[in-house]
Image (cartoon, grey):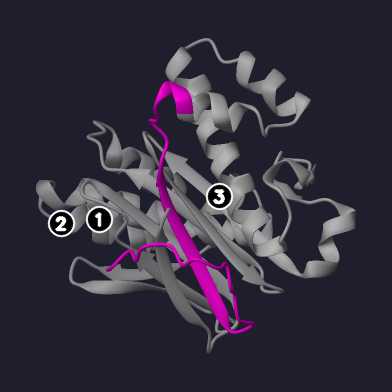
Amino acid sequence: MIWLSPPKDFILLPNEVHVWRFQLDITESQLESLSAILSDDELARANRFYFPEHRQRFIAGRGVLRQILGGYLGILPEQVKFDYEARGKPFLAEGLQQSGLLFNLSHSHNLALCAVNYTRQIGVDLESLRVMEDVEALAQRFFLPQEYNLLRSLPDEQKQKTFFRYWTCKEAYLKATGDGISQLEQIEIALTPTEPARLVKLPAWSLVELVPDNNYVAALAVAGCGWQLKCWQY
């Protein structure tokens, strides 16, 4: 997968989906610049983080999100206004919704992805690959029996990555629909170590696995078919 240098103009066609990749570990000067465009409630939330790196990554994530959305909307980053769903998911406030712009953000460790398009429900999920001792137990708890059986049948060196592939695919779809993690075991994903994932029994949805970086996996779920994907490096 190729992550292209960002275009000069933020042009998003109706049949396009854009995914932006950006780093959350930034310099002190960048941190100051991004802090200046956050709202008071975002700064208050940032200051509630106990560890400085978590505070910094929140500011970076929310600040770059504002820059990306402002680019598409043709407004300053600090003019982007958000409302929030019950689970805390941000969406454009009422005055900006007429644009039809929909987005979703995911971050893991020091990397973030932002997916953007017009009018289609959209969700993206990103996970850094890491060793979990109880991966089979987690798969048995959250996955469907056939998914658990496939993971269990794999060599140990493939189980961790396969678990996170399942997880990101399910989460991307649930983030797009607004359903919570309690529905994780209701979404069926078909995949193998050598074949890309697909949503089962959901023909009105598209699912794409992304390659964000070494030791990361990610997935993008979008309502409908026939759209074109472009991936940008912010």
Estimate how packed mark 1 is, as few (under 14), some (14 to 19) or many (20 or more) residues with alpha carbons within 10 Å. Answer: many
Reading the image, the residue beneath label 1 is: 151
Whether 20 is drawn above or below 41: the answer is: below
| Disc number for residue 105 | 3
Q: Secondary structure at mark 2?
A: loop
In the image, residue 76 lies at what x, y percent? 71, 48
Q: Are marks 2 and 1 in contact (CB under 8 Å)?
A: yes
| Magenta residues (range) | 2-29
Q: Is residue 211 left or right of residue 10?
A: left
Question: Nearer the viewer's eye, disc 3 or disc 1?
Answer: 3
Q: Residue at x 10, y 53 (%)?
A: 155
Q: Is residue 87 left or right of residue 114?
A: right
Q: How much space separates mark 3 and mark 1, taking CA atoms? A: 27 Å
Please name the amino acid that badge 1 sits on. Leu
Q: Is residue 201 left or right of residue 102?
A: left
> Which one is nearer the viewer's eye here, 95 or 199?
95
Q: How much space separates mark 2 and mark 3, taking CA atoms? A: 31 Å
Question: Nearer the viewer's eye, disc 2 or disc 3?
Answer: 3
Q: Residue at x 59, y 38 (%)?
A: 63
Reading the image, the residue beneath label 2 is: 154
Q: Residue at x 22, y 34 (%)?
A: 131
Q: Is residue 21 magenta?
A: yes
